Structures are given as structure tokens and as C-alpha cells.
Image (cartoon, helix red, strand yellow):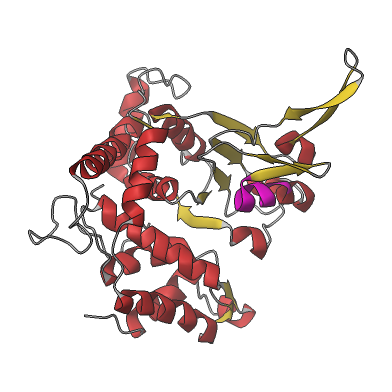
Amino acid sequence: MNHPVDLGKDDVPGPLPGDAPADTPPGAAGVSEEIRRQAETARAALAALRGEVAKTVVGQDSVVTGLVIALLCRGHVLLEGVPGTAKTLLIKTLSRALDLDFKRVQFTPDLMPGDVTGSLVYDNRTAEFEFREGPVFTNLLLADEINRTPPKTQASLLEAMEERQVSVEGAARPLPDPFVVCATQNPIEYEGTYPLPEAQLDRFLVKLTVPVPTRDEEISMLQRHAAGFDPRDLSEVKAVAGAAELAAGRAAVRAVHLDPKVAAYVVDLCRATRQSPSLQLGVSPRGATALLATSRAWAWLSGRDYVTPDDVKALARPTLRHRVQLRPEAELEGATADGVLEGILAHVPAPR
């Protein structure tokens, strides 16, 4: 994973795999050779995901890295980008490169909650009601254009995203593990859409912006299409990682050392958003734990067993941008969530 996670030209890139110091990092001592070997195998498999996705999607390496971090943290992802930037194709390709169950739901104004979670169906043969699972019973769920369905249907995902279960008629039915929601939305077309409520936005681990490709990337894309590339044919994409690699990676991420000073830095950043004059809603404590989780995952992907302040800075915007809300007067002045977070990162002193 050689690229910064976030999506802006001014982001601080994280360290590259293999650049870890020669000294034994904190927490490395005492780890069995077998566990270390499994972690290295998992890291290599997850790094190979980028190569598989590149077979169909040009560029977007940083978005793929963000998706891998979410998988390691068992977190959900909100992808935002203008139409035609391959958001859906990106998730479909990722699902092919992962040996996991995958389902897609196209969110529309007439979609009902039961169409997502499932419902009780009367069986004439047994004269009883039986539960028929909805598409949410999967490992990787693509919620395409999630803001095009009414709040009632959006809310059907709340319990699934937070509790990883679905309750129907008082009975809780657990979802498979892992379970990750990858939702897409269009940032410029608001007619006929229903903005996600803050409570649901807060349950997405990261919000990744999918940029328009660069000129060279777009030329490469056109050359592929001229050579006969079919975006509906994903047969060349091979599964390079699965549940076992994700489990080994999650275990390794949990062992990443966190210095108390870095933990205090995470808290200081989140508290600064609550005091910013440009924001009417700052980051909640859930956001602080999310920033900690993504920073640890990025540190592990970078080949280290400890979190640095630069890890926190690299993940601050994708992890926090959807958890803050601008004041109307700040919006009128042209402020953005990313801009406010950039200012906070510049002013809150980082530990040395």
C-alpha cells in the first residue's frame, strides 16, 4: 500500500511498506513466529488487492487502500463521487478479488426495508411463517446510491451496521462475519435524494471521495476500451484474499502499539472540532475511536507495530469529514469540512 489513504493533493502521505525502522518496534517482542508469519502473509495478500482492482479500474489506489483499512477494522465505507468515476465497478472488482460473499442493492425511492433485511413469508406447505433472508445477509454489501431511498429504508441498515444483526418480529438474526457495507452516493445531484441523517453517517468508518482520473489515467482508460475492455466482464480478476487473511490482519492490527501521547493527540484533534467556530457539530467519541482504529490499521499496512502522529494525520480527513457539520455562515463563506479539518491539523500540536 504505497499511497496516502485520503484524497487530496495536500495530504501527508504515510510511510511505505518496508520503511519500518530496523529497531524492534514496541509490541513486537513476545509475538510468536507463527503469528508473525500469518500477519505477513495477510499483509501481502491485502497488498495484492490493488493489483487485481487495477485490472479493471485505472488509478484510485488511495480509495482501494481506504477500503482495505475499513475491512481490517470491520468498518463501513461511504464512497462519494460524481457519476462515471467507477464507484460501483470499484466495489464489484474488490468483491471479486476477495473470497467473500457479495450482494448488491440498488437503492430507489420505492425500496422497502424488508427488501434489504428480509421478511417473514407464509409457507403454504407447512402453514407457518418462515424468515426469508434479504441481501444484507452477506459479507460485502454494495448499497448503490444509498441517498436515493427514503429515511425509513435507510434506517433498515442502522441495526445491521452497528449491531451486525437483523431483528424481525423480536428475533435477532446475526449477520455473517465479516460484514461490511460499501455505500455510494452522488455529491452534486440532490433532486429526488434523501440526505443521510447524522446518526447513520456516524456509523460509517470512513468517507472516501472518488476523484475524476488524471489526464494520463483517462487516456489509459480510453486505450483499454479501444482494445476491447468490457467493464461487465470481471473474469480476469482473481481472488487473492479472504476471511482468513482479514482475520489474521485484524489480529495484527489489534496488537499495534499505541503510545499514550498519540492517544492524547487523537483526543485533542476531536475535541478541537467541537470548539471550532466554523462547525456546529464536532466529532463524537465514536469518531475518536474510529480515528484510532484506522490509524492502527494504516500503521500495520505500512509495516510498523506502532502508531505515529503522521498516521493519525493521514487518516483524519477520511475518518472525520462526515462526522462534522459546518455552520451555515461558514458554508456561505466557502468553507468545507476538509478545509476546517486541515486547519485543525495545522494548529493542534502533535507529539514528538
Classify residue 338 by image quadrant. bottom left
On the rendered image, what quadrant is the C terminus found in?
Answer: bottom left
Residue 126 is left or right of residue 46, and the answer is: right
Q: For the point 36% across and 48% down, which residue is it? A: 251
- x%, y% of residue 81? 50, 49
Judge whether residue 250 is colored magenta.
no
Q: For the point 12% across and 60% down, which residue is it? A: 24
Relative to 329, say whether 119 is above or below. Answer: above
Classify residue 41 by image quadrant. top left
- x%, y% of residue 223? 31, 27
Judge whether residue 159 is colored magenta.
yes
The magenta stretch is: 156-164
Relative to 241, say whether 227 is above or below. Answer: above
Asked whether the viewer can see residue 284, the reply is: yes
Relative to 9, say whether 171 is above or below. Answer: above
Q: Residue furthest top?
A: 125
Q: For the point 34% across and 53% down, which residue is it? A: 253
Nearest the viewer among 21 and 336 is 21
